[in-house]
Image (cartoon, rainbow, N blue to C red):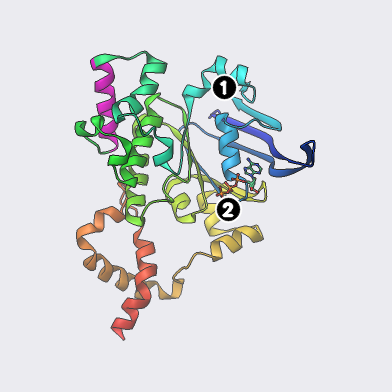
């Protein structure tokens, strides 16, 4: 399968200026020679701690920042130049979702205008046709007609992120870059938003680049992933490769930082899970994705493990 996007030796350096003449005296080497490929329709994850350069990659990819060096190849063309991006309709094909939907959705516009904007700009839709498409997009993220005439502040954080997803997918993009799309949300709401994103992916065949510091999110969503540390990728591979057999010391440290229930306690864990499922029965669906894979339950187990164990003693 041909790559959707190929990033070759990407470098993004931020100049540091100082002194009376405000001259460039040094650089922050935010992204320092990163290469990777994203296949059509897949989910690719970049994980790393704060400051490792993840967002800078996302912004360079979407054209919000200029690359210092390297190439971003899209449909055989290097789109690091604005002129080429324009010619290729790259801004329609590659969209971004941000962590903070309250500041990324225009507070003065109604949802119909926010989600409808890309449809107007890229597909020249107007009137009833536009309205019908907005309605369809909102329905895909679980919102109804009423939502169209409200403003962003009238929604919860999770609903706003879902609106951000509907807007991002409106131009029928090939790739959506999601920079920490759920980290500002509660755990159960996170699972819900991620599941809507999966649904969207299935329906529209869009690829995702997930940028996150949260291994749970990336594990839940991504087929391929890269571990980033100080501007570089220290390990890349499939989800299974990395979680089951991490090679780099930094990856091992990252994985070790997640609390885990060890294998010898598996049976005990199973009993606790059953108990938790009973306890959380009413909300259970929230913790499963549509393929029946457990998402947040693992984390609930972590939180409640000690308490339940104590209770059982
Ligand atoms: N506009 C800027 N000017 C100078 N340095 C910057 C700028 N933006 C980011 N940096 C620096 O570049 C490095 C990478 O930042 P970046 O935001 O890409 O990391 P990140 O992994 O996304 O972290 P976070 O999750 O905290 O956003 C950091 O050292 C950061 O301080």
Residue under numbered circle 1: 75
Q: Say which mark, if any, is on residue 226.
A: none
When the figure is inspected, residue 232 is found, relative to residue 252, above or below; the finding is: above
Q: Is residue 177 visible?
A: yes
Ligand 1 under 8 Å from disc 1 Cβ: no
Across and down, in percent, residue 45 comes to 52, 45
Q: Does dot 1 land on a helix, a strand or a loop?
A: loop
In this rendered view, identify the residue nearer to me: 54 or 302.
Answer: 54
Q: Determine the image quadrant of residue 17.
A: top right
Local crowd size for mark 2, using a 10 Å CA cut-off: few (<14), some (14–19), many (≥20): few
- Could you tell me which residue is drawn at 36 percent across and 67 percent down? 301
- Could you tell me which residue is drawn at 43 percent across and 36 percent down? 104
Across and down, in percent, residue 216 comes to 45, 55
- Could you tell me which residue is drawn at 40 percent across and 24 percent down? 172
Tally the marks.
2
- Magenta span: helix, strand or loop, mainly? helix
In this rendered view, identify the residue nearer to me: 132 or 249.
Answer: 132
Across and down, in percent, residue 158 comes to 33, 46
Q: Say which mark, if any, is on residue 50.
A: 2
Q: Does dot 2 land on a helix, a strand or a loop?
A: loop
Give the mark nearer the N terminus: 2 vs 1.
2
Q: Using residue 226 as the reference point, say whether residue 210 is left or right of it.
A: left
Across and down, in percent, residue 254 comes to 57, 60
- Could you tell me which residue is drawn at 58 percent across and 52 percent down? 48
Magenta residues span 128-141
In this rendered view, identify the residue nearer to me: 188 or 294.
Answer: 188
Ligand 1 under 8 Å from disc 2 Cβ: yes
């Amino acid at each position: 399968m041909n790559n959707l996007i190929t990033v070759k030796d990407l470098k993004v350096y931020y100049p540091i200026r100082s002194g009376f003449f405000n001259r460039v005296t040094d650089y922050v080497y935010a992204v320092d020679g990163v290469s990777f490929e994203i296949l059509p329709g897949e989910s690719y994850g970049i994980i790393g701690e704060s400051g490792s350069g993840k967002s800078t990659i996302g912004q360079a990819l979407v054209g919000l920042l200029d690359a210092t060096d390297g190439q971003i190849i899209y449909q055989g063309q290097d789109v690091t130049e604005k002129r080429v991006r324009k010619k290729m309709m790259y801004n329609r094909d590659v969209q971004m979702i941000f962590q903070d939907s309250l500041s990324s959705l225009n507070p003065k516009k109604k949802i119909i205008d926010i989600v409808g904007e890309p449809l107007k700009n890229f597909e020249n839709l107007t009137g009833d046709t536009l309205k019908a498409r907005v309605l369809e997009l909102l329905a895909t993220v679980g919102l109804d007609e009423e939502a169209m005439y409200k403003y962003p502040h009238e929604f919860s954080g999770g609903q706003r992120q879902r609106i951000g997803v509907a807007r991002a997918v409106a131009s029928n993009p090939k790739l959506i870059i999601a920079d920490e799309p759920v980290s500002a949300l509660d755990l159960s709401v996170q699972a819900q938003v991620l599941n809507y994103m999966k649904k969207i992916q299935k329906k529209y065949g869009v690829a995702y680049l997930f940028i996150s510091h949260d291994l749970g999110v990336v594990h839940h969503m991504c087929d391929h992933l890269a571990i980033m540390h100080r501007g570089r990728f220290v390990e890349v591979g499939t989800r299974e490769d990395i979680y089951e057999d991490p090679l780099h010391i930094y990856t091992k440290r990252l994985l070790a930082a997640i609390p885990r229930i060890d294998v010898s306690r598996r049976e005990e864990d199973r009993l606790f899970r059953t108990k938790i499922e009973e306890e959380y029965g009413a909300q259970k669906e929230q913790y499963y994705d549509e393929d029946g894979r457990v998402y947040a339950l693992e984390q609930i187990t972590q939180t409640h493990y000690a308490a339940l164990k104590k209770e059982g003693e």
